[in-house]
Image (cartoon, rainbow, N blue to C red):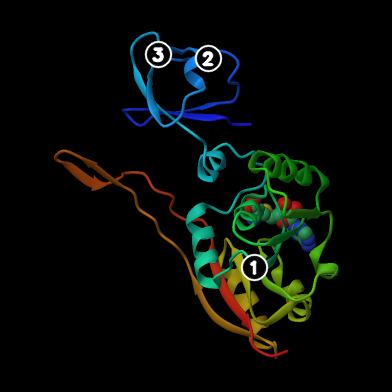
Amino acid sequence: MIQKILLTKTGQEFFVKNLDQDYHTKFGFIKKSDLKKSNTIIKTNKKTEMYILEPSFTDKFKKIKRGPQIITPKDIGTIITETGINKNSVVLDAGGGSGSLSCFLANIAKKVYCYEIRKDFIKIIKENQKLFELKNLTIKNKDITKGITEKNLDLITLDLPEPWHVIKHAEKSLKPGAFLITYLPTITQVTQFVEQIKSSKKLFYLKTLENIQRNWIINNKIVRPDFQMLGHTGFIIITRKVLK
Ligand code: SAH
């Protein structure tokens, strides 16, 4: 479990797991008595200054265990803002994968159910659930194409190769007015999915989008976009249940 974050004045981060022993970095070591402090500046034995902070959800996110490719924070942001989920929402996420999306959703929603077909990935999701100390996340070893047990859901998120097999189950399990969000890496999957949604009587196709996020370097006279960026993650398809 991450207990403290150390941040150097040049922006390097260290994640401290054990407060009962000195913490060694390439800038020297921090005495264990200093690791008990928070929100102040501490020094290594080589006099390098570091801020010491309590870990936030996003700090822990940098340390999640990864199995299958995760949904990135920029795309999770869109899922949250487009659907408006909040502390009263009940959500189902499938497939769980590494649990990145499930954990982020559980940090906001009242309850999250996560379906994952593979037992080895369930282990990874459980480890990540522990990292974030999430009590409102229930992980099930289930194939979502066989059906959804939960009813009256405020949101279903799908990140799996053939989401069109889930449409008939989502129609039954979503609340009227609730959202189905599908995340797909290739546009051929998107067209196949959207075609099938358009023949649903209960789910209404709203839009497809992708997020392109570009970081900038702001450093004295060097003010420019970063040379490196994530070129493509996935397409987000937004649909809504419009009839009971
Ligand atoms: N959104 C996840 C990554 C999902 S990767 C994250 O952010 O971490 C896709 C996952 O879907 C894989 O783990 C795969 O095993 C699972 N999966 C594929 N088909 C499934 C199905 N029919 N039911 C449940 N899970 C499924």
**Who comes first in sequence, dot 2 or dot 1?**
2
Residue depicted at x 59% and y 71%: 190
Q: Amino acid at mark 3?
A: Thr
Task: Give residue 56's position: percent from left, percent from top.
Answer: 52, 42
Q: Amino acid at mark 2?
A: Lys
Q: Amino acid at mark 1?
A: Asn
Task: Give residue 123's position: percent from left, percent from top.
Answer: 77, 41
Quadrant of the snapshot with the N terminus: top right
Which residue is disc 3 drawn over? Answer: 44
Residue contact between numbered discs 1 and 3, judged by CB atoms under 8 Å: no
Q: Secondary structure at mark 2?
A: helix
**Relative to 131, is 22 on the left or the right?**
left
Task: Give residue 174's position: percent from left, percent from top.
Answer: 72, 77
**Relative to 10, is 235 on the left or the right?**
right
Task: Give residue 186's position: percent from left, percent from top.
Answer: 57, 63
What is the C-alpha distance between the residues marked 2 and 1?
41 Å
Q: Secondary structure at mark 1?
A: loop
What is the C-alpha distance between the residues marked 1 and 3?
45 Å
- Residue 209, relative to residue 214: is it above or below? below
Q: Secondary structure at mark 3?
A: loop
Which residue is disc 2 drawn over? Answer: 32
**Who comes first in sequence, dot 1 or dot 3?**
3
What is the C-alpha distance between the residues marked 2 and 3?
11 Å
Residue depicted at x 52% and y 22%: 36
Asked if residue 23 shows in the view, the reply is no
Q: Please tell me whether mark 1 or mark 3 is closer to you in this view.
A: 1
Q: Which mark is residue 88?
A: 1
